[in-house]
Image: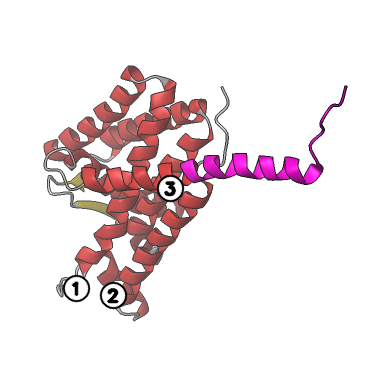
Amino acid sequence: MLIYLPKLSEQKSSLTSSKKPSSFRQKYQFWLMLLTAFIILQLPFISIPFKWLESYFHEISHGLTALLTGGSIVKIQLFPNGAGLCTTRGGSSFLISLMGYGGAILWGCLLFSLASVHRRVAQAFSILLVALFLASILLWVRDLLTLFIVLVLLGLVLAQLKYSSQKYLQMLLQMTGLLVLINSLMSPLYLLDGQARGDGAALADITYIPELIWVLLWFFVGLFATYKLSKVSFIIKRKD
């Protein structure tokens, strides 16, 4: 009886062909999620909590940078239109101003990347967010409007933890990360209003580098972060 043994080249070809569709599906999945996140941000009412979330990450990034550079957080304020304000004392003015938009981009990448690693990592990161919201309420929130917004964000994360399985928690956190990332990508463009206010104007005063340069820097950093996520996000296997 003859037994046919495929040649090594044929085996490699078979393996290559089997990997390509999987790789294509993974890449397609990322861009589909990105498109979905962009559409969600265009929807009235539904997009509001995610704009608040990006604003919170923006302001808490200012605050945490102040703490890390020897300063302190006086208070954090959030507004219904997605704007926010973090009042700090001391620390590095340059880094504090830089890390508002930069920090929001970083938070979006962290949300997506850590959720992609493992289901338990996604759960642990959600618990960390809950702790951060509670600390913000206890230490830095001084008005009822900000308290309401942070409580909404806290409820959003708690709902994801309680009512979704660990599998869906990963997907929800990935989507949330992309929503934050898209918001942080587009938000710096609102600084180009000719009013010379905000982080870009503050950095221009400190460095004498025009505000436009800082806006473009944040925008292209956001684009680069999105590109990098598209390359590595689904490569890691999700083991139980």
Labels 3 and 1: the sequence-earlier one: 3
Residue 91 makes an appearance in the image:
no
Relative placement, left or right, of 74 versus 147 is right
User: Residue 169 — which label?
Assistant: none
Q: CA distance from mark 3 to mark 1?
A: 28 Å
The percent position of residue 224, horizontal first and vertical second, equals: 44, 61
Task: Name which residue type carries label 2.
Answer: Glu
Residue 91, quarter of the rendered image: bottom left
Q: Residue at x 34, y 47 (%)?
A: 34
In the image, residue 90 sits, relative to residue 134, either above or below, namely below
Q: What residue is disc 1 on?
A: 196
Numbered range of the magenta stretch: 1-25
Give the residue displayed 18% in from the left and 52% down from the top: 83
Q: CA distance from mark 3 to mark 2?
A: 25 Å
Q: Is residue 112 visible?
A: yes
Q: Is residue 8 magenta?
A: yes
User: What residue type is disc 1 on?
Assistant: Ala
Task: Give the dominant element type of the magenta stretch: helix, strand or loop.
Answer: helix
Name the amino acid type tagged 3: Cys
Frontmost residue, 42 versus 157: 42
Q: Position of residue 27 (x, y in %)?
A: 47, 46
Q: Earlier in the sequence, mark 1 or mark 2?
A: 1
Query: What residue is rendered at 30% in x and 37% in y?
Result: 136
Q: Which mark is residue 109?
A: 3
**Mark 3 / mark 2, whichever is N-terminal:** 3
Q: Tell me whether circle 1 and circle 2 mark residues in contact (CB < 8 Å).
A: yes
Q: Badge 2 is on which residue?
A: 211
Q: Is residue 216 magenta?
A: no
Between 41 and 121, the one nearer to me in the picture: 41
Q: Quadrant of the N terminus?
A: top right
